Image (spheres, rainbow, N blue to C red):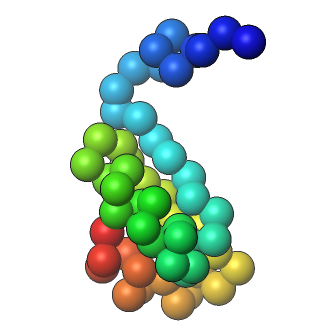
């Protein structure tokens, strides 16, 4: 398998995290936010305010 991470697209990178209200989802978002545009997705998107503020 070939690593295509450096050959697809250009900056800015966009990361979509499903399960954005979970502890794991928020932690991933915080870590990835330094180098990417992060989109949090959840079944209850109207309740993502607190998690979005953490990022």
Nearer to me, 28 or 36: 28
What residue is at 30 percent from the left and 77 percent from the top? 54
Res 30 quadrant in image: bottom left
What residue is at 42 percent from the left and 67 percent from the top? 27
What residue is at 63 percent from the left and 71 percent from the top? 19
What residue is at 53 percent from the left and 90 percent from the top? 47
**In the drawing, does residue 11 fall left or right of residue 20?**
left
**In the drawing, does residue 46 fall left or right of residue 30?**
right
Percent position (x, y) of residue 15?
A: 50, 46
**In the drawing, does residue 1 fall left or right of residue 5?**
right
Does 44 appear above or below 33?
Answer: below
Percent position (x, y) of residue 49?
A: 41, 85
Does 35 appear above or below 27?
Answer: above
Res 46 quadrant in image: bottom right
Does 1 appear above or below 45?
Answer: above
Does 11 appear above or below 26?
Answer: above
């Amino acid at each position: 398998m070939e690593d295509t991470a450096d050959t697809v697209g250009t900056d800015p990178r966009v990361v979509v995290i499903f399960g954005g209200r979970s502890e794991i989802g928020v932690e991933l978002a915080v870590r990835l936010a330094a180098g990417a545009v992060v989109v949090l997705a959840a079944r209850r998107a109207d309740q993502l305010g607190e998690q979005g503020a953490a990022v």
